[in-house]
Amino acid sequence: MAPDRELVERVAASTGLSPAEAARVIEDVLAFVAEPVEDYVRRRHTELKTYGARNPEIFARIASELADRVVAAPRLTERQIRRLIYT
């Protein structure tokens, strides 16, 4: 899915990037924040383990990182959405 044209124009104008470069940056950012929580946790665990961190330290660090990170919302069924609205 291509990024919104207006957003591309705004990023290009505010950064001096070409529209193609701005679109690529937006796509990269969207892909980054679209990473599901489960994938993020597994990826970070592997990265931190590679550098010698131990699980208790890794778990605390990941929990801290998740508190400040924009992550993809979980997929919700229509029923779950209805329940959120009407409960």
Image (tube, rainbow, N blue to C red):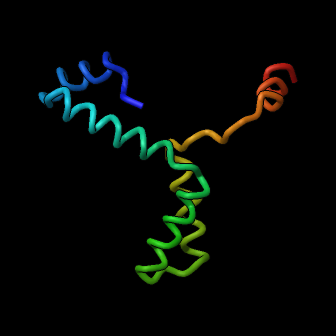
- Image height of 18 relative to 54, above or below: above
**Left or right: where does residue 60 sit relative to residue 48?**
right
Q: Is residue 17 left or right of residue 62?
A: left
Q: Residue at x 31, y 16 (%)?
A: 6
Q: Is residue 49 above or below residue 27?
A: below
Q: Nearer the viewer, residue 62 or 43?
A: 43
Residue 24, given in percent of the width and then of the height, sits at: 27, 38
Task: Report the residue at 56% width, 65% height from top.
Answer: 42
Question: Of all residues shown, which one is farthest toward the front?
Answer: 1
Q: Quadrant of the N terminus?
A: top left
Above or below, 14 relative to 77: above
Place residue 47 in its image quadrant.
bottom left
Across the whole image, how many numbered discs are drawn on residues? 0
**Which residue extends farthest top?**
6
Q: Residue at x 59, y 52 (%)?
A: 37
Q: Is residue 54 above or below residue 41?
A: below
Image quarter of the C terminus = top right
Residue 4 point in image, percent of width and height: 37, 21
Q: Quadrant of residue 17?
A: top left
State the image coordinates of residue 45 (x, y, percent, origin top left): 53, 70
Instruction: Residue at 58% x, 66% y: name it.
Output: 60
Nearer to the camera, 24 or 72:
24
- Closer to the camera in the image, 59 or 49: 49
Whole-percent x, y for residue 71 in the image: 54, 44
Question: Quadrant of residue 29 in the image?
Answer: top left
